[in-house]
Amino acid sequence: MWPSPSEPAPGAGLRFAVVGNPENRRTTLFADAVRTAGHPAPRVLAWGDVLRGRYEFAPGERVRIDSPGENAEVDLLLRGVDEPTRVEGTALWYRRFTSVVRELTGAALHAGAVTSADPEEIAVMFDKRRCHARLAAAGVPVPPALTGPVDGWDGLRRQLKEARFSRAFVKAAHGSSASGVVALSVAGPGRVKATTSVERTEDGRLYNSLRVRDYTSEREVAALVDALAPDGVHVERWLPKAMRDGRAADLRVVVVAGRATHAVVRTSRHPMTNLHLGGARGDLAAVRAAIRAAGGEFADVLEVAERAAACFPGTLCVGVDILPATGWRRFAVGEVNAFGDLLPRLTGLPGSGAEHLDTYAAQVAAARTAVRRPEHEEHHHDIPA
């Protein structure tokens, strides 16, 4: 049985429920933050139970929806394939995931609970095409992107030529953690290079790998794009990232209740800076100095992140990927992540109000006053799928 909700005793602190995978460090780190703040330990509603319809909520309960990732059983329920590292199948995963988020959020609101995220905003953040369009419509700086659907390699080559993109990022529309991301260079007929962590087997299936590789044969690149296209892809101009000590660099900024509270520099020797692909945390103080030397202020980075987060006002916390371009003088938003707060042991920025708090403790502190918008309220800047 899953845990049953109960009414909090007077003076007992806030009651939290976490929809997550019990064994995952996201869930355990948040639970630690709740207890450290003096609240009762949160109820954990396992994604495996939630996906089978086994959940309930209590009035006043703060409900956190966390990532369903890194659990083979949950992945099987969402994608119908018992291959956790498989790249294909993200469109089905997206439909099932967003559907259950809508259902459990509706149940929580009906019970009088308070949720940490808006289900429609989560749906937008998990579709890179819709997320990019929403940010652009709000005036948030983003890389130029293709606007039409991509049906395969031949169509992509034609669209890249028409848009005058010689270098582009091709991203699985519903992917995460660099799954299905391809850094593509096209120099002319037969001259292509695709850098990706995707491994293609001899029978044409795609799998995530921890090793980043290059494909330089147009036949291989075409097969890769053709396999990604059915689930949907988002294609944007490849903005050359700023460099630190010979490594490409970007920033992940966590925004809690509308305010940028945490930031980390990510560096890599290849175009993807994800830490699990060999990326490393960089020196934030050195980056701040580089921005000042270029005539800017670090506050410019935080302002861009907060503008991006403001496009999702019903979601308590988002992680915003900031792409420094033109040295350290200009900044664009690469992605907005609904579950972008996993930065263990990182404390808050000076002046943020979270100086001695990690990302989870900052959200617990904000939960006392944060209330999700009523479901009937209009969603601004939304772009239909």
Image (cartoon, helix red, strand yellow):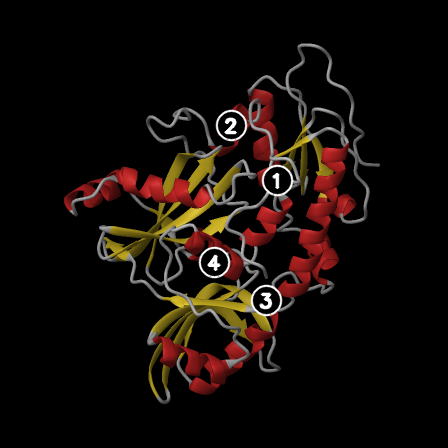
- Amino acid type for the residue under numbered disc 3: Val
Q: Would you name the residue on which mark 1 appears?
A: 377
Q: 210 and 295: which one is in front?
A: 295
Labels 4 and 1: the sequence-earlier one: 4
Q: 226 and 198: which one is in front?
A: 226
Residue at image location 30% in from the left, 51% down from the top: 331
Q: Position of residue 379 (x, y in %)?
A: 57, 46
CA separation in Å, label 3 and label 2: 33 Å
Marks 3 & 2, CB-CB < 8 Å contact: no
- Amino acid type for the residue under numbered disc 1: Glu
Dot in front, 1 or 2? 1
- Amino acid type for the residue under numbered disc 2: Ala
Q: Would you name the residue on which mark 4 appears?
A: 133
Query: Which numbered dot is residue 361?
Result: 2
Q: Position of residue 3 (x, y in %)?
A: 79, 31
Q: Residues within 10 Å of mark 2 (few under 14, many from 20)?
A: many
Q: Would you name the residue on which mark 3 appears?
A: 87
